[in-house]
Image (spheres, grey):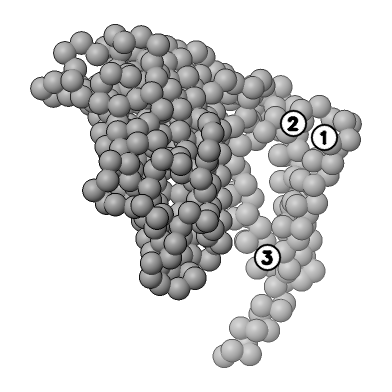
Amino acid sequence: MDDLHENRRQKNGRSLFGPIFLIGLGVYFLLRNMGIVSDLNWAVALQLWPLLLIFIGINIIVQQVRRPFGTALSGLVGLTAIAVFGAVLLFGVELPFLSRFNLQNSVEYRQETVAVSADDVDTAVVSLDLGSLGAEITGADSSQNVLEGTLSLAGDLDLRQRIQGSEAIISLSENNSNFWWGSWITNEQQPPWQIGLSRTVPLDLTVDVGSGQTDLALGSLLLSDLYVDVGSGATNLQMPGGDYDIRLDGGSGKLVMTLPQNGRHELELDAGSGAINLFLPPNMEARVELDSGSGRVSLDDRFEQISGDDGDGIWETPNYNADGANSILLIIDGGSGAISLEQRTGR
């Protein structure tokens, strides 16, 4: 029985779809890089991605035909697919058979301003879900608002707010489900989100970083808790003083973080594949509890190993005291990216 199935498989046509499609796609990229063709209409092509599934399905069917006809038919399907997608890439919605459909050549962005009043608010829980454009987050210019900012949006603004007693609960994100096909395709560079947070209202802050460059200049804020989920974009994080805890989930992007200059803190770091650079102010004492991963971990000369081995263990600075006025406990679960912790003498 196995020999019969093997004989049938050998007699069926071989697939030429994949090689032809990849060759054709490479040719279009080459022509674009050489300046022979203008910008390709990727936004339109991505909206027609179900066509690729149809071509793949047809190719699976024609492969069942005996050689050499099955192989020839597979090659014909591949040529048809690359011709259709090639025409779309080159001409976009100018093609007659696409003109009747509501397809877009690129994502259209608009600017929106947001503001959440601080009236009758003593504390706030704020969740920010950042997108692909990145963001610059700092203290608000106005003391009248818990949150304010200017956002570049392709999808719908999703700003939710409610008051529970004297606490404001705020979430900010972009609903771009209708633009999944090309939120990264635009005809011009868009500015990052500009977000200001209250300098006077204590904040329980959650930031979900996206794929863009993100600068979290939080040094002027009053934090009661902080959680940052690092994405694929680079993140710069500057922490304020005070007594609060910090949780970080590392991603594939690089994280550069300046630790608080004063106060008592506990930082839980679940590292990812991106490099992480932590800078400890000279007046802060620290304890590191490390469960290392495959990435390299380096601590500066202030730290003395208390227990463990080179990979896992506990390190402390000379004057560390868990009850001290300026101390931080770092619980690090290492990943595949490199982690460094060193003293920063200046800012």
Q: Residue 17's x, y, as percent?
A: 72, 57
Q: Amino acid at mark 3?
A: Gln
Q: In the rendered structure, which amino acid carries the disc numbered 2?
A: Leu
Is residue 241 left or right of 106 when viewed as pictured?
Answer: left
Residue tagged 2:
40
- Marks 3/1 in contact by CB < 8 Å: the verdict is no
- Residue receiving disc 1: 32
Q: Amino acid at mark 1?
A: Arg
User: Which residue occupies the extreme front position in the image?
Assistant: 319
Looking at the image, which is closer to me, 10 or 177? 177
- x 20%, y 24%: residue: 123
Mark found first going from the N terminus, 3 or 1: 1
Q: Which element carries disc 3, helix, strand or loop?
A: loop
State the CA–CA distance, disc 2 to disc 3: 31 Å
Give whichever of discs 2 and 3 has the lower sequence position: 2
Mark 2, residues whose alpha carbon is within 10 Å: few (<14), some, or many (≥20)? some
- Marker disc for residue 298: none
Q: CA distance from mark 3 to mark 1?
A: 33 Å
Mark 3: few, some, or many residues within 10 Å (few <14, many ≥20)?
many
Badge 2 marks a residue whose secondary structure is loop
Q: Secondary structure at mark 1?
A: helix
Residues at discs 1 and 2 in contact (Cβ within 8 Å): yes
User: On screen, 346 above or below 342?
Assistant: above
> What residue would you read off at disc 3?
63
Q: Earlier in the sequence, mark 1 or mark 2?
A: 1
* Residue at image location 62% in from the left, 87% down from the top: 4
Front position in the image: 204 or 133: 204
Which residue is drawn at the image coordinates 76% and 58% (left, top)? 19
